[in-house]
Amino acid sequence: MRLLLSSLSALLWVAFTHTAAHAAEAQVAVAANFAEPMKAIAAVLQKTSGHTLKISTGASGAFYTQIKNGAPFDVFLSADNERPEMLEKDGLAQPGTRFTYATGKLVLWSVRPGRVDGQGAVLKAADLGKVAFANPKTAPYGAAALQVLDKLGLKDALAPKLVQGESIGQTFNFVKTGNADVGFVAMSQVLEGGQLKEGSMWVIPQTQYDAIRQDAVLLKRGANNEAAKELFKLLQSPNIKDLIRSYGYDL
């Protein structure tokens, strides 16, 4: 028995050192709305392959500019499909690698329970405070928020109450900290295990804004990076697709 355990330990050590020796790290630029799912996916990648990810989150438009200016990213997970396509045209992405990893959903959210009703009537309430949304020039969820306000005919009326975050992450924080009464955020930011974590929300009908198709692309720098390539395989696997759906995305 002692000999068997000793042999098993030796085999496990060889397997561990082999994995560690061949493990790689990829630099990943991730749209802020996808921050929480990305953490979970990175943990699965490390457990199954030994590869690690260095994750940066922010506004998709800002990442596009950074990548154009030489930022050392291997993978870009955008909140839209336009910027990854532009990077392909710019010659900064690997041809044929772009695909839609999620379709986002916009919600109106308040950290206060019962504050936001199921039809968004709170936007017409006399006691409505500040309304947060993301910069529409750099964040697709911000552009979607303005489309909703236009459809509702409220853009001009609410103009004095609007506060703009530079990313959907900052927009979420405005509401979370009480610096805004309500805010237009990504559903993925307020769900956990498919359930609302706290507060109240209105799931905005997708007829009110253009589809938020979120594309990923392998950048030129990551062409030979094993961690980046394994991440792309993982993102398209059935189990990870189920995980992404649990955060409120469509696929």
Image (tube, rainbow, N blue to C red):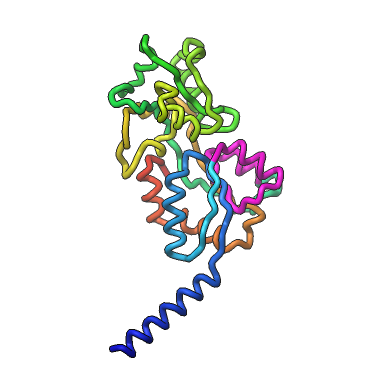
Percent of width and height locating residue 56: 55, 46
Q: Is residue 41 above or below residue 16?
A: above
User: On the rendered image, what quadrant is the N terminus found in?
Assistant: bottom left
Q: In this view, does 242 lie above or below 3?
A: above
User: On the rendered image, what quadrant is the C terminus found in?
Assistant: top left
Q: Is residue 96 left or right of residue 35?
A: right
Q: In this view, does 40 lie above or below 157?
A: below
| Quarter location, residue 64 | top right
Q: Residue at x 58, y 53 (%)?
A: 27
Percent of width and height locating residue 149: 47, 19
Magenta-span inclusion, residue 191: no
Q: In this view, does 95 lie to the left or right of 204?
A: right
Of residues 144 and 39, the one nearer the viewer is: 39
How many marks on residues? Answer: 0
Percent of width and height locating residue 46: 46, 61
Q: In this view, does 96 lie to the left or right of 120?
A: right
Of residues 172 and 75, the one nearer the viewer is: 172
Q: Residue at x 37, y 45 (%)?
A: 245
Q: Which residue is drawn at 55% across and 39% down?
A: 58
Percent of width and height locating residue 81: 56, 40
Q: Residue at x 40, y 29 (%)?
A: 107
Magenta-span inclusion, residue 83: yes
Q: Give the range drawn in magenta.
A: 58-87
